[in-house]
Amino acid sequence: MESMQNCIINKQTDTLTKMDGELTNMALKLDAMDEGVKTGFSCVDKDLEALDTCVNCCHKDYDDVVDKLKFAEGRIEVLEE
């Protein structure tokens, strides 16, 4: 009887040990995935900042061209008069 109880306890202990190992592996994988996601978001943030800078530069160039066209339009009106 005692032998059977020890066998059951050993099986349960083995099962619990395996489950603990699996949980540890899953936690490590989750940590690695979390780091990957953080790295991915960091890259996306840098790309968005670069695009924002580019758009702001293009917007400034656009405003400069608009100002020059308005000035040229004013000079054309003067010449037409």
Image (cartoon, helix red, strand yellow):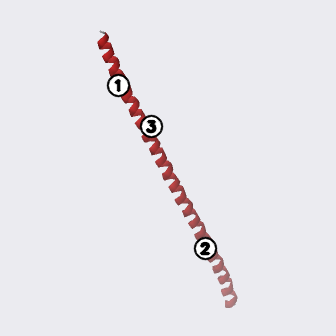
Q: Position of residue 22 (x, y in %)?
A: 38, 33
Q: Please, what is the three-letter code of the amino acid marked with disc 3?
A: Ala
Secondary structure state at the residue bearing disc 3? helix
Q: Are marks 3 and 2 in contact (CB under 8 Å)?
A: no
Q: How far apart, in angstroms, are the residues tagged by discs 3 and 2?
A: 51 Å
The mark closer to the camera, 1 or 2, is 1
Q: Position of residue 56 (x, y in %)?
A: 60, 66
Q: Which is more toward the observer, 37 or 72?
A: 37
Residue at position x 68%, y 90% in the image = 79
* 78 relative position to 11: left or right: right
Q: How far apart, in angstroms, are the residues tagged by discs 3 and 1?
A: 20 Å
Secondary structure state at the residue bearing disc 1? helix
The quadrant in which residue 8 appears is top left
Residue at position x 33%, y 15% in the image = 6
Q: Residues within 10 Å of mark 1 (few under 14, many from 20)?
A: few
Q: Please, what is the three-letter code of the amino acid marked with disc 2?
A: Asp
Which residue is label 2 attached to? 61
Which residue is label 3 attached to? 27
Report the disc number at residue 14: 1
Residue at position x 62%, y 71% in the image = 60
Q: Please, what is the three-letter code of the amino acid marked with disc 1?
A: Asp
Which quarter of the rendered picture does the C terminus lie within?
Answer: bottom right
Relative to 65, does residue 10 appear above or below in the rendering?
Answer: above
Residue at position x 60%, y 69% in the image = 57
Counting labels gives: 3
The quadrant in which residue 45 appears is bottom right
Query: Who comes first in sequence, dot 1 or dot 2?
Result: 1
Q: Residues within 10 Å of mark 2 (few under 14, many from 20)?
A: few
* 42 relative position to 61: left or right: left
Q: Position of residue 73 (x, y in %)?
A: 65, 83
* 76 relative position to 5: left or right: right
